[in-house]
Amino acid sequence: QDDALWGTLEAERLVVTQGLDNPLGQEITRFELEAEIVGLLAFDATPRAAAEAFRASQGTLAIKRLLLIWGGVRIEAEGALELDDSLGPRGQLTAKVQGLSDGIARFEAAGALPRNNATVLRLAAGLVTKPNGDGVAEAQLPLTFDGGRVFLGPVSVLRLPALFP
């Protein structure tokens, strides 16, 4: 039988010391998550066995709201994730992104994004970015989790550490 667990998580000034090297820096200014987990939740199993049972039950993490403010980039997203064969997250969220051009500049400056790609992305960002209801420049892009990486649109922005190495 499937279980459901709903909750919220909020944090300010998270400092990442290992495992999430990223041109946006080590400090996440704000993180908020409102989500529901639906699937087999084996609380009496080891973490790996519980994750395998969750995946086998086709469990999902339904993200009602994710807010991430990191290095001048603000992402607000919703969608659903599941576990892939390596027990990492897989799925897609719809994200509203502010500070996109600043983020592209940081990735380019760090050498994580070749100059030609950064130029193309800046042009594409200009096409999809428009003022939101508050007049702030915002782009709506897919935030995809696949193969241990997180992609914002077509660009890999983060390598996730393995949950079970």
Image (cartoon, helix red, strand yellow):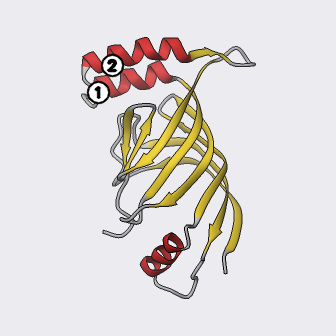
Describe the element under mark 2 as helix, strand or loop: helix
Q: Are marks 1 and 2 in contact (CB under 8 Å)?
A: yes
Say few, some or many: other residues with alpha carbon within 10 Å of mark 1 (under 14 / 14 to 19 / 20 or more): many
Q: Residue at x 36, y 70 (%)?
A: 164
Rendered position, 16 above or below 131: below
Q: Which residue position holds label 2?
A: 118
Q: Residue at x 60, y 59 (%)?
A: 61
Q: Which residue position holds label 1?
A: 113
Query: Identity of the amino acid at label 1?
Result: Leu
Measured as percent of width and height from the top left, residue 44 is found at: 55, 88
Q: Residue at x 37, y 20 (%)?
A: 105
Measured as percent of width and height from the top left, residue 15 is found at: 45, 49
Q: Residue at x 35, y 15 (%)?
A: 120
Single out the residue that lies furthest toward the bottom: 44
Decide which of 115, 58 is in the foreground and name it: 58
Query: Identity of the amino acid at label 2?
Result: Ala
Q: Earlier in the sequence, mark 1 or mark 2?
A: 1
